[in-house]
Structures are given as structure tokens and as C-alpha cells.
Amino acid sequence: MDKQDGRSAGEPGGVRLDDPWYDALASGWGELEGATEAAGEWDSRQRPRPVPVPEQRAAPHDEIYLAVQRSAAFQEVRRRYRRFVLPGTAVFLAWYLAYVIAATAAPGLMAHRVAGALNVAMLAGLGQFATTFLLTWAYARHARLRRDSAALDIRWETQELTGGNIR
């Protein structure tokens, strides 16, 4: 996903420098002051900078994650997920079981030729592949349009509450 989509850092989904996946040094920005010393021009009289110590968290991770789980935003993401996945799984499973049952219970129907060497069983088998790809595409589209931005917002809030990736 491209983070440079025209949104400013303050907008939802905009670039955030506290993103744990964003490496400012790798991009060439945010070079540490005195980076030339690290490149071999180190003066032995200088003391190395201390490693920053993370600030203490106000609440343990368990409490934060339980609070996030109880939040209305998280429940909405889960509801959207269930509203797509449960019916989609039920329909696909019914379609698959109908194919298997028809293949075992009605071999005459499945052997019926449609065109040339193509029979009903072959068309239904190819239909299984087609519906698998269709369902995969529909799931990815649904996730992108209905859940990903809300889930990312929840992730940001959780990262801020837990102090980043500190365990």
C-alpha cells in the first residue's frame, strides 16, 4: 500500500513518522546529528549518546488490548468481517457439498455431455475453481473497502497506548 497518496500527516491514513514500519533513516531523511562520526570520523573524546529509555506505560498491555476489544470501533470491524465471511463460507461450502453429493449420488447426471468431451462434472469442477477465485477477490475487495482503514486506525490507537512495539 502506497503511503504517499496525497494525504497530509494529520489526515487519517496519512504518513505518520511514528509508524513502526517507517524507517526515516532508510529513506535518507532524519539522519542523526553527527552521523559523519559513525562513518569513521569518530572523535574518541566525545561520549556516545545514551539510548533513549521508553517512558513508563500507564496501563499494562493486557488491559489496553481488552479495552480495545470492547471498543465500539473494534466491534464494528468484527461485525463487518462476520457479515461477509459467515454467509460467504456457508454459500461456498453448500456449493462444494452439492458438487460432491451430486458426483456420488447422481453419476448419470454428472456424466451428461454438454459439448464434445465436456460434461456436467467438468463444468461444475471448473465452476469450483472460478468461484474460489471470485470469492477470494470479493473478500480482498470487501476487506480493503470496509475494514482495512478502520482496523488501521485501531492499530494506531493501540500503538499509541502501548508505547509502540515495546513489550
Image: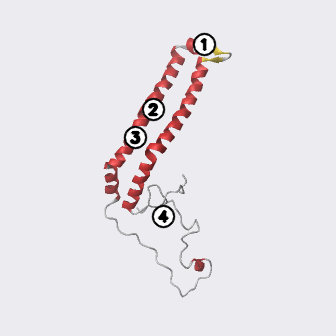
Which one is in front, 13 or 128? 13
Per the image, the residue denoted by label 4 is 17
Which residue sits at x=45%, y=32%?
A: 89
> What number is the disc on residue 80?
3
- Mark 1 is surrounded, within 10 Å at the Cα level, by few (under 14), some (14 to 19) or many (20 or more) other residues, namely some
For the residue marked with disc 3, what is the amino acid?
Arg
- Closer to the chain start, of discs 2 and 1, is 2
Cα distance in 3D space between marks 2 and 1: 29 Å
Q: Which residue carries the number 1 mark?
A: 112
**Mark 2 = which residue?**
89
Residue farthest top in this picture: 108
Choose top left, top right, bottom left or bottom right for residue 24: bottom right
User: Mark 3 or 1 closer to N-term?
Assistant: 3
Residue count near mark 2 (Cα–Cα under 10 Å), binned few <14, some 14–19, many ≥20: few
Q: How is the image coloured?
A: secondary structure
Query: Dot 3 lies on which element?
Result: helix
Residue kind at label 4, given as amino acid type: Leu
